Amino acid sequence: QVQLLESGGGSVQAGGSLRLSCAVSGITTSGRCLVWFRQAPEEERVRVATIYTDLGGTSYSVYADSVKGRFTISQDNAKNTMYLQMNSLKPEDTAMYYCAAGREFQACAPAADDYDYWGQGTQVTVSS
């Protein structure tokens, strides 16, 4: 059974930092796209950051323009865990954050519908 479990959300003031974790079980984290999405109230779920680590251990990451330079995605294959380090947080970063995993060796698509495995979400609230 595949499970993704997020943790690390919370409430911070603008300029603060949070680190989200996504513990993955039931599938391996190498050779597949791992993604952080976020969804604000009454808005669509949007991709924040993607990481793909090939079987040789080389990682590739992509970020939404809104978070470039502030957020860093990473993964620890030994722990089967993905992370999102969020610095210089802004009120507009307030949302429910979800981790997702794609199928093995599938291209990293931008749409939420393209991902089969999801966590339950963790709330991030940034106050001004």
Image: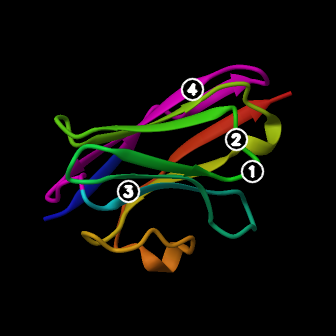
The residue lying furthest to the right in this view is 128
The type of residue carrying mark 2 is Lys
- Residue at 63% x, 22% y is 17
Magenta part of the chain: 6-30
The kind of secondary structure element at disc 2 is loop
- Mark 1 sits on what residue? 65
| Image mark for residue 119 | 3
For marks 2 and 4, give the CA distance: 15 Å
For marks 1 and 4, give the CA distance: 19 Å
- Mark 2 sits on what residue? 68
Q: Is residue 29 above or below residue 91?
A: below
- Residue at 56% x, 52% y is 62
Along the viewing direction, whichever of 68 and 23 lies nearer the viewer: 68
Q: Is residue 107 above or below residue 30?
A: below
Q: Are marks 1 and 4 in contact (CB under 8 Å)?
A: no
Q: Is residue 61 magenta?
A: no
